[in-house]
Image (cartoon, coloured by chain):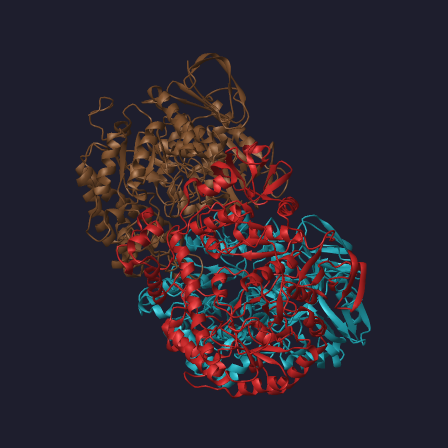
Chain colours: A red, B brown, C cyan
Amino acid sequence: MDPTHEHENRGPALADVTRGRLLLGGDYNPEQWPEETWQEDVRLMKAAGVNSATVGVFSWARLEPRPGERDFGWLDRVMDLLHEHGIGVVLATPTASPPPWLGRLHPETLPVDEDGRTEWWGGRQHFSHSSAVYRRHAAAITEALAARYGGHPALTLWHINNEYCTYDHGDEAAARFRDWLRNRYGTLDALNTAWGTAFWSQGYGDWEEVLPPRRTHYLKNPAQVLDFRRFTSDMLLECYTAERDIVRRHTPHTPVTTNFMPLWFGQDAWRWAEEEDVVSVDLYPDPRDPYGGQEGALIQDLTRSQARGGPWMVMEQATGAVGWRDVDQPKPRGLNRLWSLQAVARGADAVCYFQWRQSRQGAEKFHSAMVGHAGEHGRAFQEVKRLGADLATLAPHVSGTRNEAHVAVLHDWHSWWAGTQEARPFAQADLPVVLRAWHRALWQAHLTTDFAHPGHDLSRYRLVVVPQLYLLTDAAIDNLLAYVRGGGTLVCGFLTGTADEDDRVRPGGMDARLRELFGIRTLHEWWPLPTGGTVECDGFRGTLWSEELEADGTADETVLYKGGELDGLPAVLGKGRAWYVSTLPEPEALRGLLAGIAADAGVRPVLDRVPAGVEAVRRGDLLFLLNHGREPVTVEMPGDHRDLLTDTPVSGSLVLGRYGVAVLTS
Amino acid sequence: MDPTHEHENRGPALADVTRGRLLLGGDYNPEQWPEETWQEDVRLMKAAGVNSATVGVFSWARLEPRPGERDFGWLDRVMDLLHEHGIGVVLATPTASPPPWLGRLHPETLPVDEDGRTEWWGGRQHFSHSSAVYRRHAAAITEALAARYGGHPALTLWHINNEYCTYDHGDEAAARFRDWLRNRYGTLDALNTAWGTAFWSQGYGDWEEVLPPRRTHYLKNPAQVLDFRRFTSDMLLECYTAERDIVRRHTPHTPVTTNFMPLWFGQDAWRWAEEEDVVSVDLYPDPRDPYGGQEGALIQDLTRSQARGGPWMVMEQATGAVGWRDVDQPKPRGLNRLWSLQAVARGADAVCYFQWRQSRQGAEKFHSAMVGHAGEHGRAFQEVKRLGADLATLAPHVSGTRNEAHVAVLHDWHSWWAGTQEARPFAQADLPVVLRAWHRALWQAHLTTDFAHPGHDLSRYRLVVVPQLYLLTDAAIDNLLAYVRGGGTLVCGFLTGTADEDDRVRPGGMDARLRELFGIRTLHEWWPLPTGGTVECDGFRGTLWSEELEADGTADETVLYKGGELDGLPAVLGKGRAWYVSTLPEPEALRGLLAGIAADAGVRPVLDRVPAGVEAVRRGDLLFLLNHGREPVTVEMPGDHRDLLTDTPVSGSLVLGRYGVAVLTS
Amino acid sequence: MDPTHEHENRGPALADVTRGRLLLGGDYNPEQWPEETWQEDVRLMKAAGVNSATVGVFSWARLEPRPGERDFGWLDRVMDLLHEHGIGVVLATPTASPPPWLGRLHPETLPVDEDGRTEWWGGRQHFSHSSAVYRRHAAAITEALAARYGGHPALTLWHINNEYCTYDHGDEAAARFRDWLRNRYGTLDALNTAWGTAFWSQGYGDWEEVLPPRRTHYLKNPAQVLDFRRFTSDMLLECYTAERDIVRRHTPHTPVTTNFMPLWFGQDAWRWAEEEDVVSVDLYPDPRDPYGGQEGALIQDLTRSQARGGPWMVMEQATGAVGWRDVDQPKPRGLNRLWSLQAVARGADAVCYFQWRQSRQGAEKFHSAMVGHAGEHGRAFQEVKRLGADLATLAPHVSGTRNEAHVAVLHDWHSWWAGTQEARPFAQADLPVVLRAWHRALWQAHLTTDFAHPGHDLSRYRLVVVPQLYLLTDAAIDNLLAYVRGGGTLVCGFLTGTADEDDRVRPGGMDARLRELFGIRTLHEWWPLPTGGTVECDGFRGTLWSEELEADGTADETVLYKGGELDGLPAVLGKGRAWYVSTLPEPEALRGLLAGIAADAGVRPVLDRVPAGVEAVRRGDLLFLLNHGREPVTVEMPGDHRDLLTDTPVSGSLVLGRYGVAVLTS
């Protein structure tokens, strides 16, 4: 056991992998290259400070070229070679892409979409989560891998499957869906009640009538769609835990992860994270996005929170282009380093890439890599080398430290699943849009922010923000009310508490206790705004949404709509420590509103007087300053500090160059 | 028999339902609510003056939860409760949404689209109009309903199915399509001739080769598509008449309707209306549409005309949002009342809603209702109450009166079906766009307008307008020519008489007799305009379309194109009482043109000097004035009148407030 | 044997059809018309100078109304009638549209798309190229036609099928695909290597696992897609050669063609042209396209080059509208003549139309024709008559002459197929866009241009231009290098030589020998530009694309990027006679660049001081001047000439009217 373990009885963790280091690495697919290239690979890895390689993610057909026929020789040599050079291996189960023979021999393992169209091999992820045959074959190859490499000294971490993301509407999935529903509801009556099947004559008289939401003539039952999304997340999780349990049996002390896609709709990542020893994420902000830095911060804050405060891993990112963007530009010089160090600032202990060496063939050969097509002398690799040096410099100071946040943003996949459906008046106010806007306001106000589930213990936060939780369970509402009663400050955006757990609209269109909390007598109507439309309020303009509210006169603070149909009606209500914001204020207004409420709640920004475009983050005792702009900028830094990256003293102020980073100690 | 019956021998009619009242009501779905809510429902209905409830529209699964197993108890209680409170019941056959068991036991009842994709249960309307099994089950539940409730004193009207709108391209539909074609054409030779199968080698040598227009590699046979649309309308009509005949057998004196969707492509509503005792329509203009008021007027004029002058029913409208619009705003304060009274002005004797109480679950829970999520104190219900009072005030004056029109607009579904197909140069000049533009010109000119079929007797109209009848049968052309010979004034837009009944282009690209009627020697070329493009004419600009015409020198009046390729060629030709307009003049120009021609034909507007945005309609002796604007407006009203709604005298002028309405008697 | 044959042993050729004339004609479909109309047809044909009619293109169902039952009587009469009036017949095999009975009796002949959807009869081209049953029936009807009409005196040319363009992803196609792959690769190992199946676990262990690229969950294997496109072109070619061989057996001296669609993605037209005696193309520039004239020139240059310098045929064009365009305008007065004479200028000896008489029924009844719906007096026919007179005037001077070009543009379908796929950063720089831009620059510079395949002998050209050949085989690179070594001047646009024959990215992202040729040390990154975006260079702006290049210091000429991320890096490199252009210069800049390089290479424009919008082309000793504008324009013409069309002398200058043409001899 590693002496850095905080508790004797905790399970394996990322610290067991990092052992005081920051990881630098990436997906390594030696099976795409002749063995002579492997030698160059390890030479360049060493040159760049790479200390981790993720192996085997898509190797099933190579490992098992024909049913039951196994070929591990090449993988033995890869593992040995990496170990020989001191590079740890994140070993993946290869189950995200079954070999062609599986689909040919067992077509029932192929997923079917809602229109009944089969998804064939020739891409990837052509497996039905519900297929017993798929699961059996996946378990067998996982068992074989774990048995063979469980004891290999290179092995540091298990990586199960890859970016779980599939759906299936076929007959075997239908049977599994019925099992899942039987388990959830017990009786058909309970299902009929939860799904509101009295509407449109959908009452089920026999379990066998229940199907996944397949193509319909007109709108689908929304509760059926919601449950199918829950079921899909759960089925994929079963696939994950089945493989996890196999490797855990062989290597109880080796941690296990699976890599999330960023803010991915298909998985309840809160639930999933509970089943992981290490939380890892793939991080792909668009280099052309002027808010790409904030997008990264959002994913990092979310992932750190899923990792219960961290540390966590960037399992994939790109040194440059990704291949799948409409306008697919590389990262400008310096941006890769900036965004990598940002992840470290926000709690990552590992910065990994897809992939080590850019493929010459296959569907992702235009996805950049640590070693691009241009090779060792290409800019991509040169920048990776510099990053490797930076990470080595920072590691002793960063390792074992954590971020502390006094603000939490609530997010819940079930609410997202319920709210993002057809025939919703809030289609233009879809959750990710609203979530990003609220997070951006906090990010620009330099308020370090965790994410939390509405059922979590919130008492450690001074400010809790709910951008949009259309669906809130009764228990979640209890939790919010208790939080406010306990002295917490709560700010909710529109569409909070509209629906219950079954996507049933609550009487009044918003939970009555919440209405009382905010001082709302009647929610008469929703007034969605057209694309790009705004609504005047007293002091700012609202976007996306507005509401025809009638206050009950108990609010302490009210901001009114001005002009138009809502003239004189409340846009924002503040009652004690509870706030309701019935529109999305334009960015500066939302930032000002939240900064003010945060200040009243005793939450201070990380740093004052930070120039625009500079991000300030504290991790442990370190202060990270990150310049997201292409122009140099001066930051006032009263007192004496030292920049760890340059090993130079900083007094009173410092200049950050284009995409520049400083990591200050006092 | 009701003494208000005009003729002893007429069948049942809307007057049997209204009995001197104006109906206010809506779809009532008590099966979605606990019985304690029913008590509140009737209390609120009474408070609002609701006197009609539409029950059972989607109740099949509740009435027949398993094949052959019937549960009528709840419906007995609903019928009794409503009757007890004096509320009449529009009782629906529930056949628009079969229970899940039907699809499971008989998958052949599910419709298949042109790509071969099944439409499953879980939405609604998942039935094939051609399925013998579906029809048998639909007949059985209809029979059971009619037998049980035919004698119930609450029953006032039968409502068959709901918004018939489905298609089927499957094998059973293919067999029915062949039957229908055999009946239409008699021989394969006749079919081959009508479909022009010599083109692209499509000649059929055996009836079994004939299919619905399924997915093809390239363009489909347009006559096949046209006949499939005819067939689809006819099959749905067979579904309707089969159920109608069942209920009529039980209740020969209770009228029957089915609710049309507004200007719906899929049904030949002229033909359908002939099979109805009461014509009813669903009315959903967009509150954000600046021409929403005209859209309503168009549907109302069309429905009144289908009801042979009226009265007719608004079977559904919304108090606010509908759930399915991209930007789905509620009706601003007052608009619901305005548009409801507009329907009465244009001949409606019933103003009903979907639905009474807003659903908390299901696909339409964001569709507004008479009692919204906000309940009794919400704005929606408060406005319904006010409307109920207005309707009660107006009823004694309105009941039994009719609108009189001297202008008719011709519309024909077969022409629409033929003209709206792929590979048409007039895609941007699609019929509804052109129809709305011409109706708008007449509406803004305060010319009360009926709609008529091109085969109808037109002699009672002084002016007949043909916005676009691409397909005209020989008989229809005879009819138009006879109308003009008889002294009528005819104005035709472009694409009049291009094709014959089989979508066969007439020699010359326009029927020769029509060319002679208008003074056209040669139609050289069509010049469709690009989106938003215009063409200069002498005195106005044309939109959408232009034509390279050669006049024969017999026209009395000619407006020329100016500049461009068509410089100096005729844009508008007037020859005697026949006019041809080869472009779509911009709105003011079209209004001016039609107002001038109407004046020459002796047709006067309802009122002179009406301010912009105010609509004036006469029904019987009443003059309805409707302000479609949000600002008050003064209307000059020479003489002395009384406003029935406010029971106040009006002398010389009156002020209509925001969305204000006055109903004047002299 | 015709005495005009240049060589005794050459096969049949277009000269055997034209015999000193220029052909005027079109698709003639008498089966759509009563026989009395045929008499009018021949009268009007004679009046217009029509000397060729293409018969039978879609006549299968008429010729074989039931399996094996043949009806040739009508066609006998058509052939006799045309011959009687001196009109030659281009006789088509009718195999592009099988009769309905074939699909009904043999559903396996119907193509299936990648989603598994069948393409049914009711349109056209509903045949699977891989179906043995289809091929057998196609061969039988072809055999019957050839046997019956091979000796008919009207027969001048065989026209096989029509616009080959289909795909099939079904099971029989899958089997044929495997055969094709076995033939190409020999072993599964070789296939796995070529397809890079190590990526994403796609290794094939059994031939039966290999499929066409059907629907996948995520990105498809690009080499599989590339080979499927090769296979599709080859299968269609097999269909063509099978029918060609049948007719050739009957009529060894009658030439054979099949009509290409213009710049059509689906066929390797270089390969196909080798199998044709006559190369023909369908020509449909948009009359509204301001560069429609250049689009025509491009297709004409390409077709002439496929015909090894010509002559060639316009098999189809439209007198006006086509029916399938979004905005489908006719050709303005004069444009049909201009574009027809342009084709003659660029080597066509035949100007034919789809179709002779506009259909009244069927999917293309809005496609214009030589005799439109307006008939004999319509503008379309009047303009055809004038064209007929012009062609008769020119024929004696034009026949047997050829165009001479010193510039070649390289184009290759395999490169297009490889480059146009999902997940490509160059989606916005798709080959046709870039190809058109480069050709436009040469066209506007009045540099007569051939097209060539990268494997062709290029030594006869002084300048070779490569707009974009993403895929270049090793042999093609050898060829380019040899060309430059031999004194040729080479100008390459971006994405030249990125990939090898298997779509495998070459090390460095561009072939190393090419990098050396241009003086490039490292291609660091691609920088695609957003839609409409530009990049500043020294002296011009680039569009679509830019690159982060590091020069090796050996270039003679360098144009640099200015500002932005690429500031100071090379945009254009010239090293000896080899040039690399890493962006798409704006039109004037590209024209200037190419004109300068051409001048240095000793290539002169056809004419100096040509006004904008006028095209100058030499064919033999004739100089064609074509005014693409609607305003008259004066062209300086030093010396004395004669305009053949007007039979008037030209001295010093001449005026071309709207869409005017002059054909000058010295």
**Residue C350 appears at what percent x and percent y?**
57, 64
Whether residue A628 is situated above or below residue C200 in the rendered picture: above
The furthest residue to the front: A8
Looking at the rendering, in which quadrant would you find the C terminus of chain A?
A: bottom right
**Residue C225 appears at what percent x and percent y?**
51, 72
Q: How many marks?
A: 0
Which quadrant would residue B57 be assigned to in this image? top left
* Residue nearer the viewer, A214 or A512: A512
**Residue B1 appears at what percent x and percent y?**
19, 25
Which quadrant would residue C80 be assigned to in this image? bottom left
* Residue nearer the viewer, B271 or B104: B104
Whether residue A102 is situated above or below residue C43 in the rendered picture: below
Q: Is residue B127 visible?
A: yes
Whether residue B433 is situated above or below residue B214 in the rendered picture: above
* Residue nearer the viewer, A534 or B243: A534
**Residue C602 appears at what percent x and percent y?**
79, 71
Looking at the rendering, in which quadrant would you find the N terminus of chain A?
A: bottom right
